[in-house]
Amino acid sequence: MAEAHQAVGFQFTVRPDGVDVKLSQEVIKNIYLSGVTAWEKRAIQFKNGILTGVYPASPSSWLIVVITMMSSLYIRIDPSLGMIDTIKDNLPHREYISVQTRAVLSAILFATGLWLFLIYLLRYTLKALLSYHGWIFESHGKMSTSTKVWLSLVKMFSGRRPLLYSFQASLPRLPVPSVDDTIHRYLESVRPLLDSEQYNQMEILATDFKNSKAAQLQRYLILKSWWGTNYVSDWWEEYIYLRGRSPIMVNSNFYIMDLLYLTPTHRQAARAGNVVHAMLQYRRKLERGELAPLRALGTVPMCSTQMERIFNTTRIPGIDTDTVQHLTDRKHLVVYHKGRFFQVWLYTGGRHLLPSELETQFQRILNDTSEPQLAELKLAALTAGNRVPWARARVKYFSQGGNKVSLDAIESAAFFLTLDDEPQGYDPANTKSLDSYAKSLLHGKCYDRWFDKSFTLISYPNGKMGVNAEHSWADAPIVGHMWEYVLATDCFHLGYTEEGHCKGDVNKGLPHPTRLQWQIPKECQDVIETSYLSAKQIADDVDFHGYLFTEFGKGLIKKCRSSPDAFIQLALQLAQFRDQGVFCLTYESSMTRMFRDGRTETVRSCTSEAVAFVRAMEDAGATVSRTQPHTKNTSNKSGTHNIKPRRDYSHADGGGEVGWCVWRCPQCPCQNAQRLALFRKAADKHQHMYRLAMTGSGIDRHLFCLYIVSKYLGVDSPFLKKVLSEPWKLSTSQTPQQQLNLVDINKFPKYVGAGGGFGPVADDGYGVSYIIVGENLITFHISSKFSSPDTDSCRFSQHIRKAMLDIQALFKPENDKTVEHTEHVQLENGKKHI
C-alpha cells in the first residue's frame, strides 16, 4: 500500500520525551500551490466581475472621462455647468485640504458620477434596442432597412469582447401579454381539437374568466413582472419541477448521446479521462465568465443565467418541495462502478488533473475487485423513486455519521460519473442499438445513476459516453452547449495516442480514489428496495425507438423554401393522425432566453391550418405511393401502376371546363397545388406562433402564472383548471446543435452528435425529440409506454418517415423534372386534362 502512505500529510510517533512530528514536504508544496491557484482564481473572478459590472463600457473609459474633466481645469472650460464647484464647496473637512487638491478631487468625483451615468444610459439604451423584436417576424433572407439600422445600433452599443454575463443587465424583462390576446390565442389553439358543443362550453368558460377574475389576477402578475427579473421562471422551476412528488427518472430527466458515427477511443478509462478534463476546462471558463455569450444573428444576446448551475449542483429532496443546492469551487467528483462509490480528487498541486492522470484514476477503479457494501449496490435507487420516501430516508438515515459524510461527498461533487459495464452506442447492423442506448442513458438499471445531480456523465466499456441531466435547474440547450464544447475539445484538442490512451505522462504517484463508506440499516434497505421496484416498473414500461431519417435533411427542405422545424412539425401532425386517427394537443418547446432569466414557452403545433393540411393529405384521393412511376398508359381500368379510378374530385381543366378525374395520383398538379398551398399556410402559421412564443407572447406560461396567482388568492377558476389539466399527448422538442460552431461538420461530416431525448409525457401519448444534423440527416428519439395499447414507438417512426416523404413529394415537380404530368388523366367525356 505504498500509495496510501503518500496520501498522508504528516506522520507522528509518541515517545517518552514527547511527540515527534514529520511533515511531508510534498503535501506542504501542494497546499501552497492550491492556495496560490485559489487566489489567482479570485483575482480573475474579481477582474471579470468589474468588466461585467461596467459593460458595455470598460474600466479604461473611466480614466478617459477623468482626464477630460481634469483638462477642463486648465483650459478654464467647465463642462459640468458648475457642478464641480458645488462639489468642491461641499467636500467634508475642506479646511484641511488645499484649494488645488479640492479641485482635483471634485473633478474626479464628478467624472466618476458622469461615467456611471453614461454606463447606465448605454445599458438602458441597449435594453430598449433589445426590446424590439420586429426582426424575428421578417421573412428569411429579407431584412428591412429599419432592421438593418436597428442591428447596426445594437452592434454599436454592445461593446467589444463581451464576457458570458456581460449582457445580463441589458436584457429586457419578459413582458406580460394581455389577457384578451392570450385567451383569443388559446381558443384559436383548441378550436381544431373540440367539436362545436365542446368549443362553445370552453368559450363560455373563457369569457366568464375574462369578465370576472382575470383583471385582478393580471394586476398581480404585472406587479411581479416589475419587481422580479422574470415573472415566470421562479414559479416554473418551483411548481413544475421541484414540487413534483413523483419520480424524476424518465418523468423529468433527459439524456444526450455521444457522437453518432465515431468513437475516438475504445478504452473506457481514457475516454472518460479526456471528457472529464474537457469538462473541467469548461467549468473554469464558466466560473471566470470567459465563455462568449450565445447571440442570435451573431448580435442579439441570449440570457446566460441557467449556465451558472451546470456544475456543483444537486437537487435535494424535501417532503413538500425539493430545493436546488448550488455550491462553488468543488474539487472532487464521485464515481460509481459495479455497486461501489468512489471519491476522486480533481486537483493536484493547484492544477487540474491531466487527462492521463484521470485515466489512471479511472483505470484503478475499473481494476478494483472489491465487493459493494451492504445495500450499497442499489443505494442510488433512492433518487429514482418517489420523492417523499427519499426525503424522509435522507433525514432519518443520512443526516449524521459516516452516511452523512458520504452523502455530502456525492451532493457536493462537481458532477457524478458512472463507469458502466455494458457497451452501448449506435450500430448500423443492429436496428435496436439506438433504442438500447437511449434507455440506458435515460434510466439505466435504475440504481446506477444519481438522478439528483445536475448531470450524470455515463461512460461505457466500448468508449461511448452520454449524459443524463436533471431538468429543474436548466433546459436541454444549456447541457447541449457544454456537451458540444466537451466533444470538440476531446476530439480536436486533447486527442489520444496510437494505442488509444490519453496523451501525457502517467503519474502513478497520485493517491488512490477512496471508497465512500455506508452503514445502511434494515429499515433503509426496505426503502431502497421499494424505490427500486417503483423505478423499475417505470423503466420497464418505456418504449423507446431511435430512428435515423437519411432520405433527405435540412438542405433539401430549405430548397423547398420551408422552415425545417415547421416541415418536421407538420410531418409529426400527419404521422400522429395516421397513427391515432385523431388530432391531439401538441407541445413544442421554444426558448425565451432573449429575456432576462428566460427559459421556455410552448408552441401549440396542432393548429387549424395544420389540421386542414393533414386532412387534405388524407383525402381519399391521395393514397397512392409517392415513388410509383407514372406513364401515359391508361388502358388498364383496374389501375395501372396501382393508380385507382376516382370520381369525387372536380377541377377546371386547361380549357376552363370542369371535369372529373378518373385516376387519382399524388403527383397530379391539381391535387398537389392545393396541398402545397395548405402546407405553406400551415408552415407560415407555425413559424408565426413560434416567433410569438420566443418574443414573450405565448399562451401557456401566462395562463400557468395566472393559475398560480389564483391559488395564492384562493380564487376558483373553472377555466384555468380546465386549461392546466389538458394532457399533452404529443410532446415534441428540437435538440439544438452547432451552438458553438467549434467543428465544421461539412468538413468533418462524421463528427456529429446523435441528439437526445426524454420520456413520454402522457400515458397514451408520444414524446418526440429530433435533431437536424447537417444537411442530410434528421435523428428522431421517440418514446411511449408499453402499457398503452394505442401507442408503439417503432410504428410511429414509420409514420414519421412516410409523412416526411409524402410532404417532400409535394415539392417533387419543383425539384425533380423526371416526372411527366401532361396527358396523365383521362376524362369520362373523352377529353384529356392537361
Image (cartoon, grey):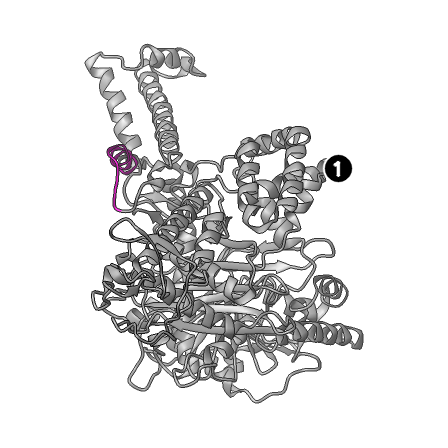
- Is 142 colored magenta in this rendering? yes
Q: Position of residue 394 (x, y in %)?
A: 72, 64
Is 409 located above or below residue 273 in the figure? Answer: above
Residue at image point 58% right, 65% down:
760
Nearer-the-camera pick, 779 or 492: 779
Return the residue found at the far bottom: 369
Q: Position of residue 601 (x, y in %)?
A: 51, 47
Which residue is tagged 1?
714
Q: Main secondary structure of the magenta part?
A: helix
Nearer-the-camera pick, 735 or 124: 735
Quadrant holding the C terminus: bottom left
Describe residue 693's horizontal placement relative to residue 703 as left or right. left
> Could you classify mark 1 by the number of other residues whose Cα lies within 10 Å: few (under 14), some (14-19), or many (20 or more)?
few
Amino acid identity at mark 1: Gly
Describe residue 775's horizontal placement relative to residue 124 as left or right. left
Is 361 located above or below residue 595 in the figure? Answer: below
Report if residue 19 is visible in the image: yes
Residue at image point 59% right, 30% down:
223
Specify start and end residues of the magenta stretch as a single range: 141-155
Describe residue 65's horizontal placement relative to residue 408 as left or right. left
